[in-house]
């Protein structure tokens, strides 16, 4: 195997394998930009197999061209990742410079292809992707500035924040706790500038403008909550905990048991968004106008629908509290609702507790129904099997009879053959006898003087009857 073959093989391996093999193949000189006979480069294979880890290796270490478009249908790695419905792979490619606007030979972008096959979350992720360079712009001094609007050390975290598709305020709390540098007044200021630039640019993007404005308001709100908490507790141990803010955000309200703080926060965003002529804003306000706090549709769902599309959560079973959708687990009690971890579960327990037992019973009933359905199906299948079996038996009997008849016919044929054989041997014997007679006749003829009855012999040379007739007088001599 050449290093190139090994690299292709490793890149098209299913999850969990191939990473080390790919690393070795790259070290041995394999080219990650070289297509195989199918016109697929190792990067295209890895993207299609949803291998975010391999994509990272091939681009970072192997210097694979993330926008390679030599595929016969013009498919890029991003398009393959979109078709494989893998958010980590898509993000891995986007964050390595994959261009979302590239189109295939039919003029479709990766986002459109994802939407076409029903991967709405991916379509939204790519469609609303924000290029790193646009954010980088704010980390440099412009005009008379003596310091940039965004401290360069915040670039990475801020970029992660703006490219995250989960807009749930509870999720934002977790993000800020794990990236505490974002609790910096410069971040909401830059987010507001981003919102403005998305609104004022020639190819205006209402979706991103509203998303960034929401993030600006939400981060500012959490920053204030965190500072108040620090003042109240009088301690600053460097540990960032937004627990109190999280509690207020998720405190249940209304028949939908929505998070009160989250609902209020998003309604405030809609009130304060400065570009009131935005059609998207008006649509959102209209959806919420008739519903009171904590009724459906909730403000969180309206925001998600506007920014990520109505289908966003249709095919996901996300965390009940924060909408995280990877790695969630069922509540052990009901095994119906899902949580990303114990923190969200504890937060949701006052709401979920009275329902957990009911949900459990409903699930057991459903399962019992399913089981009885399954039993019924099994009975039907058994019936069908026994019918099939009796049919098979009948067919078997018919086959047996046919075989018997064939045997009989064969016996008859054998008898006829042996008869034929004996007839044949009789014929052979007769022939042999005739030959002997001929030889005797020839011998006799040689003894007959010429001019006698020789003419008669000559005429009947081939005729046994006449030969015998000719021979007879000779025997009598
Ligand atoms: Zn959660
Ligand atoms: Zn439960």
Image (cartoon, rainbow, N blue to C red):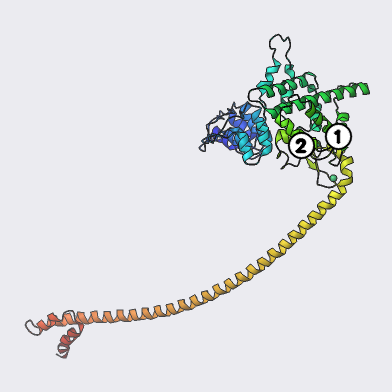
Classify 94 as above or below 141.
below
Q: Residue 66: horizontal and vertical position, in percent?
A: 59, 28
Label 1's element?
Answer: helix
Q: Front-most of 191 and 328?
A: 191
Classify 337 as above or below 381.
above
Q: Locate the C terminus and report the quarter of the image it occupies.
A: bottom left
Q: Residue at x 85, y 25 (%)?
A: 240
Q: Give the mark nearer the N terminus: 2 vs 1.
A: 1
Taking the image as shown, residue 462 lies to the left or right of residue 5, namely left
Gap between marks 2 and 1 measured at Cα: 18 Å
Residue 419, located in which quarter of the rendered image? bottom left
Q: Is mark 1 within 8 Å of ligand 1?
A: no
In the picture as drawn, the residue positioned furthest to the left comes out as 451
Taking the image as shown, residue 358 lies to the left or right of residue 196, namely right
Label 2, residues with CA under 10 Å away: few <14, some 14-19, many ≥20:
some
Classify 271 as above or below 438.
above
Which residue is labeled 2 in the image? 287
Q: Residue 462: horizontal and vertical position, in percent?
A: 18, 79
**Which quadrant does ligand 1 occupy?**
top right
Q: Locate the N terminus and report the quarter of the image it occupies.
A: top right
Q: Front-most of 115 and 201?
A: 201
Q: Is residue 109 visible?
A: yes
Q: Is mark 2 within 8 Å of ligand 1?
A: no
Residue 442, located in which quarter of the rendered image? bottom left
Which residue is labeled 1 in the image? 260
In the picture as drawn, the residue positioned furthest to the bottom comes out as 476
Q: Residue 30: horizontal and vertical position, in percent?
A: 56, 30
Q: Residue at x 76, y 19 (%)?
A: 189
């Amino acid at each position: 195997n050449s290093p190139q073959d090994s690299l292709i093989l490793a890149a098209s391996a299913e999850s969990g394998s191939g990473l080390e093999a790919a690393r070795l193949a790259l070290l041995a000189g394999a080219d990650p930009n070289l297509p195989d006979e199918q016109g697929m480069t190792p990067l295209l294979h890895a993207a299609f197999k949803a291998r975010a880890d391999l994509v990272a290796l091939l681009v970072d270490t192997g210097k694979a061209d993330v926008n390679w478009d030599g595929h016969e249908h013009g498919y890029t790695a991003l398009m393959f990742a979109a078709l494989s419905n893998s958010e980590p792979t898509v993000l891995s490619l986007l964050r390595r410079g994959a261009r979302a606007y590239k189109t295939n030979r039919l003029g479709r972008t990766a986002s459109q292809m994802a939407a076409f096959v029903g991967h709405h979350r991916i379509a939204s992720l790519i469609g609303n992707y924000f290029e790193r360079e646009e954010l980088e712009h704010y980390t440099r001094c412009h005009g008379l500035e003596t310091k940039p609007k965004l401290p360069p050390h915040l670039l990475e975290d801020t970029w992660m924040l703006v490219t995250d598709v989960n807009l749930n305020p509870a999720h934002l709390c977790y993000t800020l706790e794990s990236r505490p540098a974002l609790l910096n007044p410069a971040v909401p200021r830059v987010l507001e500038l981003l919102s403005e630039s998305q609104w004022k640019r020639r190819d205006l993007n209402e979706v991103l403008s509203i998303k960034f404005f929401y993030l600006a308001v939400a981060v500012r709100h959490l920053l204030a909550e965190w500072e108040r908490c620090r003042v109240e507790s009088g301690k600053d141990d460097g540990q960032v905990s937004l627990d109190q803010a999280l509690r207020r955000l998720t405190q249940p309200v209304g028949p939908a048991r929505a998070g009160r703080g989250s609902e209020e926060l998003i309604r405030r965003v809609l009130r304060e968004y400065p570009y009131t002529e935005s059609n998207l804003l008006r649509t959102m306000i209209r959806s919420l106008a008739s519903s009171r706090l904590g009724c459906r549709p909730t403000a969180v769902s309206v925001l998600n629908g506007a920014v990520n599309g109505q289908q966003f959560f249709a095919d996901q079973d996300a965390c009940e509290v924060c909408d995280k959708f990877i790695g969630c687990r069922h509540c052990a009690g009901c095994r119906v609702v899902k949580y990303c971890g114990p923190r969200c579960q504890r937060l949701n327990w006052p709401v979920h507790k009275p329902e957990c037992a009911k949900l459990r019973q409903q699930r057991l009933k459903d399962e019992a129904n399913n089981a009885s359905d399954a039993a019924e199906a099994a009975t039907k299948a058994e019936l069908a099997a026994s019918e099939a079996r009796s049919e098979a038996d009948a067919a078997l009997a018919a086959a047996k009879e046919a075989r018997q008849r064939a045997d009989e016919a064969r016996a008859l044929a054998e008898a006829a053959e042996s008869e034929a054989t004996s007839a044949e041997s009789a014929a052979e014997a007769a022939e042999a006898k005739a030959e002997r007679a001929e030889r005797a006749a020839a011998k006799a003829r040689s003894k007959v003087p010429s001019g006698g009855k020789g003419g008669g012999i000559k005429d009947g040379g081939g005729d046994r009857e006449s030969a015998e007739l000719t021979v007879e007088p000779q025997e009598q001599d």
